[in-house]
Structures are given as C-alpha cells and as structure tokens.
Image: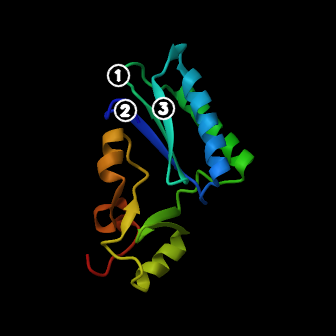
Amino acid sequence: MNISEHSRIWIYQSDRVFTPGETELIKERLDAFTAQWLAHGQELLAQAEIRYNQFIILGVDEQQAGATGCSIDKSVKLMLDLEKEFNISLFDRFQLAYRDGEEIRTCNREEFQELLSTGKINGDTIVFNNLVSTIKALETKWQIPMRESWHTNLFILSEV
C-alpha cells in the first residue's frame, strides 16, 4: 500500500481463495470504493489490496482525515455486498489461517485444535493475525509464529 505506515487498516479474510477472475473483479470494486470514500464529506486517502487471493486489506491514512462510524459502516456494507456477490464469508472470525510450508490453509476453531493436538500445528507455525490495525503492524506482526499471537489465548500449546 502506498499510504503512511501508520495508516489504519482492516483485514477481511475470505473462507476460500478467490479465482483469478474474482480477484480482478473484487479489486475493481475496492478501487472504485476507495476512490470515492468520504467521512463527513471529506475525502479519505484510502487504498485496498488483496493478498494471497484470500485477504482483503482496506487502509485509510488518518493523518489526512479519519474514518468515522458512518464511513466505516459504508466499508462494512461493501464487504457484505462482496460476500453476497461472490458467495464468500468475510466475517467469520473463527476461520483461522496458517501457513503449511508455502501453502496458506484455513480451518475452523475445532479443526485448528485437532491440528494442534496431532502436532500438525505448533508454536512455530506461522499464523495470520488479522487483528493488526496499521500498515506497519501488517508488515511486522500479521504473519507470526503462533506462540507470539493471540491464538495462544484460545488454544493450549503443549510446549508453551
């Protein structure tokens, strides 16, 4: 993203990988939205991107103008519209993503616990921390070992 590293972000993780055609269409919708996104009539310096054909990242440089409740509501409506249009889920916070080598895998909370129990996932497994809230944190704290993430609050690591 070409906005300040202190810009506020929201990460929406899809429950599945987008096809190349879907990625292109979603990116067009995101670009159209960010080009006209306003907060109390003031234009927001915003950008959006899609990473790994599965994560939608929406960012606002709040040094220029801050996102407000109404403007955030508009972005949520956009995500809800994308869910319907592309038959995806973007708001399931118990759909967890992790790296399996170079592959990105997703699973629900129960499956994640089972993978932990069998040792397929451990404290060294890279997980996606979709709670990061700035571009700087996106680059440094989005993909981290499970033992360093909030995941340890929900799941017990045998080696921790």
Identify which residue is drawn at 59% across, 51% down. 90
Q: Are marks 1 and 2 in contact (CB under 8 Å)?
A: yes
The mark closer to the camera, 3 or 1, is 3
- What residue is disc 3 on? 47
Q: Amino acid at mark 3?
A: Gln
Which quarter of the rendering shows the N terminus? top left
Please determine whether, in this image, residue 103 is positioned above or below residue 133: below
- What residue is disc 2 on? 7
SS type, badge 2? loop
Give the x, y percent position of residue 147: 29, 68
Q: Residues within 10 Å of mark 2 (few under 14, many from 20)?
A: many
Identify which residue is drawn at 36% across, 53% down. 142
Identify which residue is drawn at 38% across, 47% down. 132
- Quadrant in which residue 129 is drawn: bottom left
Q: Which mark is residue 25?
A: none
The answer to whether residue 4 is left or right of residue 56 is left
* Residue that extends furthest to the bottom in the rendered view of this protein: 118
Q: Residues within 10 Å of mark 1 (few under 14, many from 20)?
A: few
Mark 2 or mark 3, earlier in chain: 2
Please determine whether, in this image, residue 26 is positioned above or below residue 158: above
The answer to whether residue 97 is left or right of residue 145 is right
Q: Amino acid at mark 1?
A: Gln
SS type, badge 3? strand
Q: Amino acid at mark 2?
A: Ser
Mark 3 or mark 1, earlier in chain: 3
* Residue that extends furthest to the top in the rendered view of this protein: 41
64 and 72: which is toward the camera: 64
SS type, badge 1? loop
Q: Which mark is residue 63?
A: 1
Give the x, y percent position of residue 127: 39, 63
* Alpha-carbon span between mark 1 and mark 2: 8 Å
The mark closer to the camera, 2 or 3, is 3
